[in-house]
Image (cartoon, grey):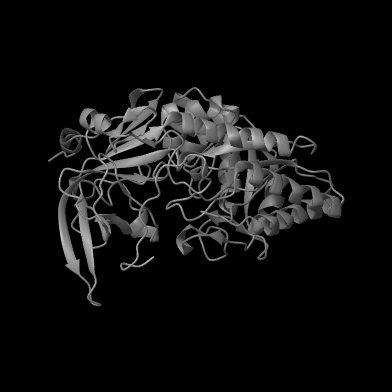
Amino acid sequence: MSAQNPRPAPEPAPASPATPWSATVRRGADGVLAVGGLPVTALAERYGTPLYVLDEADLRARARAFADAFGEAFADLGGGADVYYAGKAFLSVAVARWVHAEGLRIDTTTGGELAVALRAGVPGEAIGLHGNNKSDAEIERALRAGVGRIVLDSLAEVEQVAAVAARLGVRAPVMVRVTTGVHAGGHEFISTAHEDQKFGLSLAGGAARAALDAVAGRPELDLLGIHSHIGSQILDLAGFEVAARALLALRAEIAEQTGRLMPEVDLGGGYGISYTGDVAPPTPHEVAHALADVVRRACADLGTPPPRISVEPGRAVVGPAGLTLYRVGTVKPVRLDDGAQRRYVSVDGGMSDNIRTALYDAEYTAALADRRSTAPLVPARVVGKHCESGDVVVRDVALPDDVARGDLLAVPATGAYGRSMASNYNLVPRPGVVAVADGQARVLVRRETEEDLLALDEG
């Protein structure tokens, strides 16, 4: 994409596998976008902007699609499969309830995420605790809640979790996160399986095997299996086959040498979505059947029975279900070095509600949301109100030439990581999250106010 030839946002087309819009988004005869039967103009008037809008029906359908697909794909493999929703993408009490009701478990990475899942009434056995630097308090809370698994990320955590479990008089169910050397997906900083990074224990370097042997030697720990996560925003499933074969080979090797056949293997998540309408990501059905085929063939080659498989989609469940509404402020033409002109469209949010463009060079698109325009399309950049030149929401998009102060813009595919990574930079209050379904809206997370910010300031 270039400033001379940027792409406009595709119109909502729920039947298109490449659409970045959630399933209920429609543009009415008056040109106003609607979500879940509600016009965005009404949402903006009632709840203000910026505003995160979640399409409840779409989110639930995506969660159910993963549960159904993996249940079907692994039905004839002895171990079966579990799908954990990666709560780091976005977690609230309502979202935790929705995904659990649709058949998913919840993967948490901090005490805060664990607290939300428990507040939602998700039973402990349906929750996992992840993270590379767990505190004793987080581990204790997880064990007291009876979580289904704790994923160990270092040799030190073997002793740490065992000590907490011994103090509580319980046996902790654990998995060991293995770094397979396979990495896939987008930006280097969100590829999480190469060796030089903070997550996991190296398979090639022997740390993974050392941790597994250490766990087996601790009676306070119940070794469920091994875990891997190879990256994020993955559109090509080939990397999963390489990683899965490495994990299953390690499992078979340990079984042959020790007689212990670990019952579970987690293949992680990171499944990609469409952000701009130019790619068609793999469907839950395609992901599930591809992974089932890999596990079936690899276990047959190794002569071991298949383990119970688990996966952790997050972005693929909530990302496409969300959009962000902004109100346009300053619109400024800027001449570029090559003589071309770009329209800088400033909105009332920015990097405080979506840091991914600045952090990962992520691509998004945007559309005029409150009217239809017949004006010619011009190269534009959607930017925020923060005191940073890198405060960009959408780097390159074609918008109508008559976009002006007061217009509403909608940025699709922001359900994942927008609110989760939001900040108060420049002391801007974080937007609220509103869910829409069947013509009704309700607040899931209320908008912050200046009073909230001042209440934290002890002077």
Q: Position of residue 186 (x, y in %)?
A: 49, 60
Q: Is residue 146 visible?
A: no
- Residue at the image position 20 percent from the left and 53 percent from the top: 346
Could you tell me how many numbered marks the image carries? 0
Q: Where the C terminus falls, by quadrant?
A: top left
Tell me which corner region of the image, top left, top right, bottom left or bottom right, holds residue 257. bottom right
Q: Is residue 367 above or below residue 37?
A: below
Residue, far bottom = 338
Q: Is residue 363 above or below residue 264?
A: below
Identify which residue, 319 or 116, lies in the foreground: 319
- Residue at the image position 56 percent from the left and 55 percent from the top: 235
Residue, far left = 459
- Residue at the image position 65 percent from the left and 33 percent from the top: 68
Q: Is residue 442 visible?
A: yes
Q: Position of residue 445 (x, y in %)?
A: 33, 30
Q: Is residue 364 above or below residue 34?
A: below
Q: Position of residue 387 (x, y in %)?
A: 18, 57
- Residue at the image position 67 percent from the left and 65 percent from the top: 204
Tell me which corner region of the image, top left, top right, bottom left or bottom right, holds residue 372. top left
Left or right: where 305 falls relative to 139: right
Residue, far right = 303
Left or right: where 289 falls relative to 439: right
Q: Is residue 428 above or below residue 235?
A: above
Q: Position of residue 249 (x, y in %)?
A: 77, 56
Identify which residue, 214 or 238, lies in the foreground: 238
Q: Where the N terminus falls, by quadrant?
A: bottom left
Identify which residue, 458 or 392, lies in the foreground: 392
